Image (cartoon, rainbow, N blue to C red):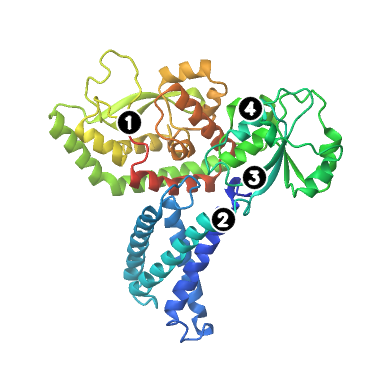
Amino acid sequence: MSVRILKHHIQLPILVLMLLEAMFAVVALVLVETRWGTIAFVQALPHWSTALLFAFALLLANGAMGMYNTRLREHLFGLALRFLLVAVAVLAAIAIVLYSFPNSHVTVADCATAIALWAGASLITRYLLMHFVSDGFLKTRILVYGAGRQAQSIANLKRRSDRMGFVVVGYLPAAGEKRSIPEAKLVKPGDDLLAFCEEHDVDEIVVAMDDRRQEFPLRELLHCRINGIDVLELVSFLERETGAVRLDVLNPSWIIFSPGFRRSWARDLVGRTLDVAASLALLAVAWPVMLLAAAAIKLEDGISAPVLYRQERVGNDGKVFRLFKFRSMKTDAEADGVARWATEEDGRVTRVGAFLRRSRFDELPQLWNVLRGDMRFVGPRPERPEFVASFAETLPYYSERHSVPPGLTGWAQLCYPYGSSEQDAVEKLKYDLYYIKNRSFLFDVAILIQTVEVIVFGKGAR
């Protein structure tokens, strides 16, 4: 089961976990501030606003460490390490705030104790949710109308993150359909579809027929919908559950009639203003790192070696621009003029370049591209014209990813590792289309927060 908040689907178990951890944070700080209840809670009312800010800071840091990512696969030690990083980051921020406002009633020691309590309660809660909650907990019970190729796209969802929000009651074969689902998973509700759904507590019917022209069950589905059972088409269901637009079941009419894919001059103006302000702020902070990076490149490759690498990329509306990066490969990496993907253990990458790529410092010069308006902070990653020309011919809907400005980071970069093949381009396109359909200011903020995890843990770097 998922909840749509500000144009973005959040799995209900994740939302429940966030609310529980926010409650733990508030209670922990209030307990510490009231000296474990020896001071009346009424007297601590002025502290509640501080506790709410404290909880918000912890949830924000948790999000930055990927702790609310449905694809997180850490065991107890990994979770404890991430909680430790969260604690260090939040305590450092609190120390700076308390130094600026020395008359505050909260101390760093109090916050450290509260964070320890919060982390312990959160670890126990996560362990209980992971090991003792039943498979059907907070999940939508769905009946799939169809048992052919399209219905199989639901059966083929293997990742736990993709199946977190639902449980399949069964697959109902459509008339004249070639079946791809095993017989054991099929159901036969008889003549009364509504009675079957009520008997088996079905919350939602997903229409996944291979051919809707073959006896589409309009009356039965209408009866179910009027009686409170949601009816959803397959593309929208997969979009909601996987955070991606599935190309193999996508049709143009879904793009035309579905909500989303909207553009707003007000949003573009606000986004551009924030991009410029954030770029200038980051440059003000990162210039020492950029000078050190330039010096390291010169030391490794010689004083005459170029520091920056300029490469043509395709941007908004298909316009080509020059992208700037710190050079991380040898100067003769593409001496023959043939564009190549970067690969694992790529021999063209220098020693300094390997560090710059892992830390993402090689991307810092792209702040200039953001200032120039070539890019945004969040958007699909810009590709080289050679690759774009090839993909546009072979991949449906690939050109649509250029309907928005490219970005330094994006939804596809969070959800899928570094791409180095046409198949990778297909997978990333699914996430790019999801972003373009659902993009909003707060979705961009959420992506930026989650990008911190990618940088800290060096995910997807090559």
Under mark 1, the amino acid is Phe
Of badges 3 and 4, nearer the viewer stands 3
Residue 261 at least partly seen: no
Left or right, residue 450 beside residue 145: left
Of badges 1 and 4, nearer the viewer stands 4
* Extreme-top residue of the structure: 336
Q: Are dots 1 and 4 in contact, CB under 8 Å?
A: no
Q: Residues within 10 Å of mark 4 (few under 14, many from 20)?
A: some
**In whole angstroms, how far apart are the C-alphas of marks 3 and 1?**
47 Å
Under mark 4, the amino acid is Val
| Helix, strand or loop at mark 1 | strand
The answer to which of marks 2 and 3 sits earlier in the sequence is 2
Q: Name the residue under label 4.
A: 249
| Helix, strand or loop at mark 4 | helix
**In whole angstroms, how far apart are the C-alphas of marks 2 and 4?**
29 Å
Question: What residue is at 41 percent from the left and 71 percent from the top?
Answer: 114
The dot on residue 167 is: 3
Of badges 2 and 3, nearer the viewer stands 3
The dot on residue 324 is: 1
Q: Residues within 10 Å of mark 1 (few under 14, many from 20)?
A: many
| Helix, strand or loop at mark 2 | helix
Residue 287 at least partly seen: yes
Above or below for 387 versus 408: above
Q: Are dots 3 and 4 in contact, CB under 8 Å?
A: no
Under mark 3, the amino acid is Val
Query: Could you say which quadrant of the image residue 205 lies in?
Result: top right
Q: Residues within 10 Å of mark 2 (few under 14, many from 20)?
A: some
- Viewer-proximal residue, 158 or 230? 158
Image spot of residue 381 (x, y percent): 44, 32
